């Protein structure tokens, strides 16, 4: 539910557009934008942390996901930490 999905979609569309456009200046501009967005998501940002669960340095550890949490008592606080790591 974070805004990263919109960022990833914008980067993807910029890559696709760069493949179709014939103007080299536009192609480079859109590819550069997409690469910068992707690198930011993966850890090239002021916090030096990855925003992709299970990837890179200091990634998010507690996504809102029932299977990752792995509660055996159907409570958000039990266990206090997620039992499983999601990747991607």
Image (tube, rainbow, N blue to C red):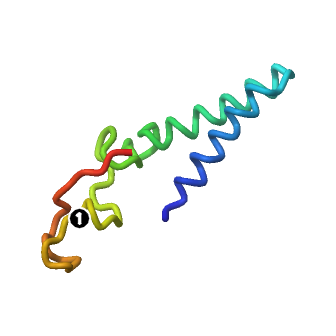
Q: Residue at x 28, y 61 (%)?
A: 62
The image shows residue 87 at horizontal and vertical percentages of 33, 45
- Marks counted in the figure total 1
Q: Is residue 21 above or below residue 4?
A: above
Which residue is more in the foreground, 85 or 48? 85
Q: Is residue 8 left or right of residue 31?
A: left
Q: Quadrant of residue 70?
A: bottom left
Res 69 quadrant in image? bottom left
Whether residue 84 sits left or right of residue 38 in the image: it is: left
Measured as percent of width and height from the top left, residue 68 is found at 26, 59
Relative to the observer, which residue lies in front, 46 or 56?
Answer: 56
Asked whether 86 or 42 is in front, the reply is: 86
The residue lying at 27 percent from left, 62 percent from top is 67
Image: 75 above or below 12 = below
- In the current view of this chain or complex, which residue is farthest to the right? 23
| Residue 58 on image: x %, y % | 29, 46
Q: Position of residue 79 (x, y in %)?
A: 13, 70
Q: Residues within 10 Å of mark 1 (few under 14, many from 20)?
A: many
Camera-side residue of 84 and 33? 84
Q: Which residue is mark 1?
A: 69
Residue at horizontal 35 percent and vertical 66 percent from the top: 64
Q: Secondary structure at mark 1?
A: helix
Q: In the shown orientation, is residue 52 left or right of residue 76?
A: right
Q: Quadrant of the C terminus?
A: top left
In the depicted structure, whether residue 79 falls above or below residue 12: below
Left/right of residue 70 with respect to residue 39 in the rendered view: left
Q: Residue at x 18, y 77 (%)?
A: 77
């Amino acid at each position: 539910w974070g805004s990263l999905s919109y960022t990833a979609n914008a980067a993807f569309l910029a890559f696709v557009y760069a493949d179709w456009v014939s103007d080299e200046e536009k192609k480079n501009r859109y590819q550069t934008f997409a690469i910068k967005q992707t690198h930011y998501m993966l850890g090239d940002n002021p916090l030096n942390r990855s925003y992709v669960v299970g990837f890179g340095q200091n990634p998010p550890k507690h996504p809102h996901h029932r299977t990752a949490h792995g509660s055996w008592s159907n409570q958000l606080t039990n266990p206090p930490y997620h039992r499983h790591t999601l990747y991607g």
